[in-house]
Image: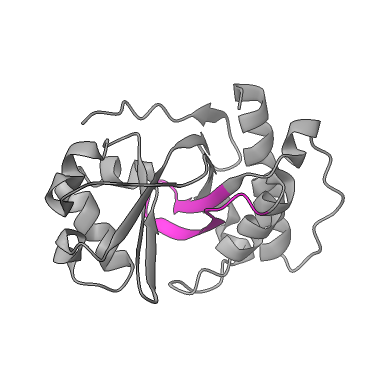
Amino acid sequence: MNDFEGEIAVRLAREVVEAEAKGKETGHVDVPGSFQEKRGVFVTLHTYPANRLRGCIGFPEPIFSLASALVQAAQHACHDPRFPDLGEDELDRIIVEVSILTPPQAVEVFDPRELPKVVQIGVDGLIVERGPCRGLLLPQVALEWNWDAEEFLGQTCVKAGMSPDMWMDERTRFYTFQAEVFSEDTPGGKVSRKEMGGCR
């Protein structure tokens, strides 16, 4: 995505969030042709200026067009079950962030203890699966919490409802993906690409 497309994605998400919080229907979506490509996407809401998570919902797999995935993710982010529904009075106190994902790729290692060596902090997001348990953390989360690769793996397991040491069990499956992240600097303000500065 170029920066112009990233800004359009965030503006669209903001428009949908505002309509949803006001109990209105989302109107016609006018976006570039590139938004018809199927992409995974997450919409994250943060409080401003405290920068606390207020909602985060999305689709890790490219099953919808980017335009459709953005609209649905933005609507659902207003009703993240971890939080009360977003109210209209909060709209000028939230930041809208959009993460556009690459398709998940299975991580293949001979020994699970090798996993921290292949996970790139600030580059990779993680999906974990074991039986009915599944969890996902976006790449920027590890940076925001200053986690190393082991902690990132463990916290992804926790997100899936497992104990943090389950990443060392050979029956636990991991997938990595990357994300281009665009965010408002202030509520409804300038949109910038988040440079995450990945490292191992």
Task: Tell me residue 109's x, y (percent).
Answer: 23, 46
Left or right placement of residue 82 versus residue 41 in this view: left
Look at 31% across and 25% down and name the residue there: 197
Q: Residue 144 versus residue 117: which sits nearer the camera? A: 117
Q: Residue 114 versus residue 64: which sits nearer the camera? A: 114
What kind of secondary structure does the magenta stretch mostly adopt?
strand
Q: Residue 79 versus residue 48: which sits nearer the camera? A: 79
Look at 84% across and 40% down and name the residue there: 30
Q: Which quadrant of the view contains residue 144?
A: top left
Tell me: residue 70, above or below residue 100: below
Q: Which quadrant of the view contains residue 2?
A: top right
Residue at the extreme front: 110
Tell me: residue 45, above or below residue 177: below
Confirm whether residue 147 shows in the render: no
Confirm whether residue 179 shows in the render: yes
Stretch in magenta: 41-63
Q: Which quadrant of the view contains residue 86?
A: bottom right
- In which quadrant of the rendered image does the N terminus lie? top right
Look at 33% across and 54% down and name the residue there: 174
Report if residue 50 lies within the magenta region: yes
Tell me: residue 158, above or below residue 93: below
Look at 30% across and 46% down and name the residue there: 108
Left or right placement of residue 53 versus residue 164 in this view: right
Task: Tell me residue 146's x, y (percent).
Answer: 20, 42
